[in-house]
Structure formats: structure tokens, C-alpha cells
């Protein structure tokens, strides 16, 4: 085991062997932490995920009194799987909601999608019968109803702008207001050059929102 735990915002993932002794040891440590800090694990908001075993998963979940979460599942839009295979669609969704994708990236995504559309799984080069503009039209207007990647990306970022503008009740929004926006006017604040690329991308989409 090279990774024992991962923290993200208010979530904590703890990794161990799929053995009763390992899970009991972790629960013992969490109990000790509770005595010292006064903070305790909420079983109703905790899950047990098991990979690599065919039997005993339910017994492990019962031993630590949490629900068993079946894989594959998703966390923050990204797939959690028991293999090395990750859905390209889910990867695209994650990055489309994180930053403005460069033209080279959206162009490559469009090339992959159209190759699959016209050639199937073989992904061979074929002449495209219609243009991207036609493919992305709504079905009611003789198109295929496929979402334009650049428009989808922009809409996803605008969704984050909306969350910030309305001060949606979640940790990500509260953190940005307390640490980056503070007392500034969200709509008119200058885009800081020393902040992350993702944050600058979100601020650059305010006019579109």
C-alpha cells in the first residue's frame, strides 16, 4: 500500500487491505481520534468501497457499521472503478467543468467523436457527409442533436459562475468567497494574475453568464 489516505475539501478517503483486521484497526484509530478531538465519524455519511475480492464485502461493511457502496461509482464527476479503465466521457465532463478547454483540445475531441460517428469502433478515416454545424443542430431542425463541445464547456463554466454569484450553500463557494472574493464585487473584480488557471477561467466567463 503506497497510499493510505486522501483528503479533499471536507472528505476523507482511507485505504486499507480488504481484511477484517485492517478495517477494525482503522476504526480503533478513528475512535482514539474521537476521544482526543471530539470529532467523530458519521456512519450515515460514510461508505465502504471494496475492490479485488468477490466475497466478504458485506461482512466488512457490517463490521464498521457503514453502507456498502458498489463500484463503479462517481466522485466529483470522475469515475471510481476497480480497473484501470476510465470513461473518456467522464474525463471530459470533469475537465469541462474545471477550465476553458484549449481550441486544440476541443478540436481533437471533435475529431475523435466524428471518427466514431462515421466509422464506428474502427475509427478509420472517412469523408464526413455533413459538417459540425449540421451535426450539432437540434433534431427538430434536421440535425443530430449532438452537443457542441465548446458551447458545452462554456455552459459548464457559466454554471460555476452562477453558483458563486448566488452564493450557493456549499463548501467550494464559501471557500472562494472567504479567501479570494472577500469584500470585492464578484461581477467587477479584476482577474488576479497570481491565482490558479481554473479560477481565472471562471472569472473570464462572467460576461457570458
Image (spheres, rainbow, N blue to C red):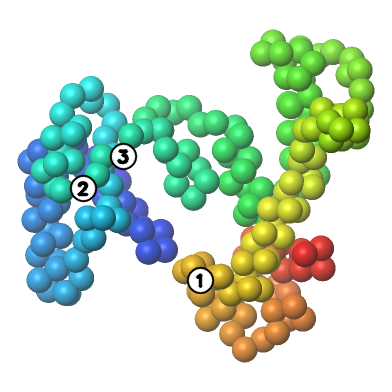
Marked residue nearer the N-terminal end (1 or 2)? 2
Quadrant of the image occupied by residue 54: top left
Is any atom of residue 4 visible in this view?
Answer: no
Label 1 to label 2, Cα distance in Å?
Answer: 26 Å
Residue tagged 2: 66
Residue 1: x and y in percent read: 25, 40
SS under mark 1: loop
Please count the marks in the image: 3
| Residue 169, numbered label | 1
Most foreground residue, 30 or 145: 145
| Residue 69, numbered label | 3
Q: Judge the density around disc 3: few (<14), some (14-19), many (≥20) Cα neighbours within 10 Å.
A: some
Residue 188: x and y in percent read: 77, 81
Q: Judge the density around disc 2: few (<14), some (14-19), many (≥20) Cα neighbours within 10 Å.
A: some
Is any atom of residue 1 visible in this view?
Answer: yes
Residue drawn at point x = 66 percent, y = 73 percent? 165
Quadrant of the image occupied by residue 194: bottom right
Amino acid at each position: 500500500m503506497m497510499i493510505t489516505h486522501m483528503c479533499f475539501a471536507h472528505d476523507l478517503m482511507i485505504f486499507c487491505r480488504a481484511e477484517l483486521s485492517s478495517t477494525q484497526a482503522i476504526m480503533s484509530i478513528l475512535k482514539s481520534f474521537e476521544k482526543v478531538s471530539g470529532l467523530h465519524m458519521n456512519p450515515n455519511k460514510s461508505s465502504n468501497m471494496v475492490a479485488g475480492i468477490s466475497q466478504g464485502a458485506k461482512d466488512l461493511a457490517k463490521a464498521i457499521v457503514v453502507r456498502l457502496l458498489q463500484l463503479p461509482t462517481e466522485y466529483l464527476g470522475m469515475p471510481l472503478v476497480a480497473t484501470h479503465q476510465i470513461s473518456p466521457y467522464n474525463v471530459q465532463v470533469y475537465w469541462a467543468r474545471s477550465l476553458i478547454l484549449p481550441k486544440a483540445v476541443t478540436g481533437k475531441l471533435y475529431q475523435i467523436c466524428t471518427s466514431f460517428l462515421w466509422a464506428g469502433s474502427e475509427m478509420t478515416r472517412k469523408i464526413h457527409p455533413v459538417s459540425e454545424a449540421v451535426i450539432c443542430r437540434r433534431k427538430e431542425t434536421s440535425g443530430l442533436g449532438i452537443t457542441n463541445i465548446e458551447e458545452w464547456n462554456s455552459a459548464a463554466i457559466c454554471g460555476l459562475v452562477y453558483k458563486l454569484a448566488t452564493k450557493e450553500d456549499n463548501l467550494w463557494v464559501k471557500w472562494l468567497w472567504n479567501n479570494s472574493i472577500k469584500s470585492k464585487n464578484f461581477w467587477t473584480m479584476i482577474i488576479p494574475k497570481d491565482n490558479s488557471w481554473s479560477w481565472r477561467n471562471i472569472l473570464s466567463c462572467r460576461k457570458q453568464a
